[in-house]
Amino acid sequence: MKKRLLQILPFLLTGLSVGIFYLAIILISPTRTQTPAAIEWSYFLHSWQVLLSAALLTLGVLLTFYLWSRTSSLLYRIGLVVCLCLLLGTAYLSMGKSVITSMFERLDGGRYLAAAQADHVADEEMVMGLTVGGKALAYPVKMVSYHHIVNERLAGEPFVVTY
């Protein structure tokens, strides 16, 4: 029983590491209803994510070295390598710029298309509009909801668009 548990532990660690990383993103997603508890959990996971992913990666590396010499199964060894790659990937992503902080970076204007050319915005999708001096711009709500603020100039005047 202990041997079997030890053999599946790298896979469990990998699932935990990937799960923690994506759970923090899912809980803070601005395109769905947020609750105070979900936001609190997301920030909690985010604050511990670097330490947890580094610890899980370290444990995964140690387990892989230990288990590698104790198995001759090519399929199991491939599984160990996949686990290491996923653990390394979540550790790398956790230590870089976080999804949570990048969501609150302002957008400074942008590239604009005529409404007929904006095929990435569905007809029923909500947009926020700004009209000044006969000139108009529209921002998809799902784009602005990730950044929360857009610095803009329209008709030579500075504006801040927020959601």
Image (spheres, helix red, strand yellow):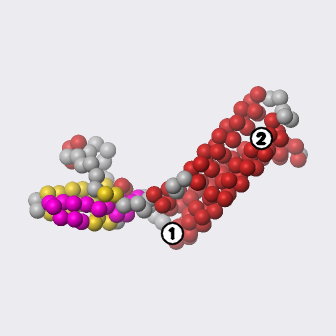
> What residue do we see at 53% from left, 61% from top?
27
Circle 1 residue: 35
Q: Is 76 in front, or is 101?
A: 101
Q: Is residue 89 above or below residue 132?
A: above
Q: Is residue 81 left or right of residue 106?
A: right
The C terminus lies in quadrant: bottom left
> What residue do we see at 68% from left, 53% from top?
54
Q: Is 118 in front, or is 103?
A: 103
Neighbourhood count class around disc 1 (C-alpha, 10 Å): few under 14, some 14–19, many 20 upward: few
Q: Quadrant of residue 103?
A: bottom left
Mark drawn on residue 64: 2
What is the residue that sits farthest to the left in this orientation? 134
Q: Position of residue 24 (x, y in %)?
A: 56, 59
Q: Is residue 7 above or below residue 56?
A: above
- State which region is magenta: 144-159
What is the residue that sits farthest to the bottom in this orientation? 36
What secondary structure is found at the residue carrying circle 2? helix
Mark drawn on residue 88: none
Neighbourhood count class around disc 2 (C-alpha, 10 Å): few under 14, some 14–19, many 20 upward: many
Any part of residue 131 in sight? no
